[in-house]
Image: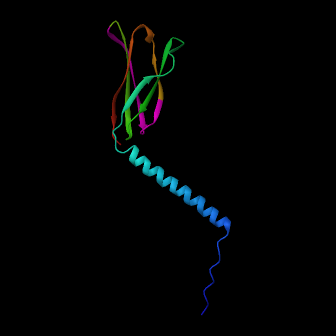
Amino acid sequence: MSQPEPKRKRSSAEWITFSISSLILAGIVGLVCYSWLKVGEHPPILVIERSGNIRQVEGNFYVPFTLTNKGGETADAVQVTAELRINGEVEESGEQQIDFLSGGEAEEGVFLFSRNPQNGKLILRVASYQKP
């Protein structure tokens, strides 16, 4: 029979590595717990806003927008619409679909119009989304 090896002392490098690894692991576990508690299961709160200036290029008007999910849960297949009303009538409309928008995430996009949106009323809205 062989005799068991005597336990050797850990070097300071091993203790430092162990400490750093433990701190990283504790940080990750803490962030996951914080995310569960803070974000929780709040439904998506989708907000669309015009962002930036309307620009004209070769007869088209580019209207930038930002879509933000201020809720906690993810929204899939977010449908965004834009209507340009001139003299109370819808002259042009457009729609886009954002595939995936997690809680706290923002996505940017652009609508194109052939008429100047500054000559009418531009309505941007979120039409629908799906739960993942």
Q: Position of residue 39 (x, y in %)?
A: 39, 43
Main secondary structure type of the part rendered in magenta: strand
Quadrant into which the C terminus falls: top left
Front position in the image: 93 or 5? 5
Please give the name of the residue rendered at 32% of the width and 10% of the height, measured from the top-left corner: 89
Among the 4 quarters of the image, the one containing residue 128:
top left
Q: Position of residue 12 (x, y in %)?
A: 67, 66
Task: Report the coloring of the rendering.
Answer: rainbow
Please give the name of the residue rendered at 55% of the width and 60% of the height, measured from the top-left corner: 22
Please give the name of the residue rendered at 59% of the width and 93% of the height, measured from the top-left corner: 1
What stretch of residues is rendered in magenta? Answer: 88-107
Residue 121 within the segment the image draws in magenta: no
Query: Taking 5 as reference, is 49 above or below it?
Result: above
Q: Position of residue 59 (x, y in %)?
A: 51, 11
Among the 4 quarters of the image, the one containing residue 73:
top left
Query: Taking 24 as reference, is 86 above or below it?
Result: above
Query: Taking 27 as reference, is 66 above or below it?
Result: above
In the image, 116: left or right of 132? right
In the image, 10: left or right of 106? right
Residue 96 within the segment the image draws in magenta: yes
In the image, 36: left or right of 56? left
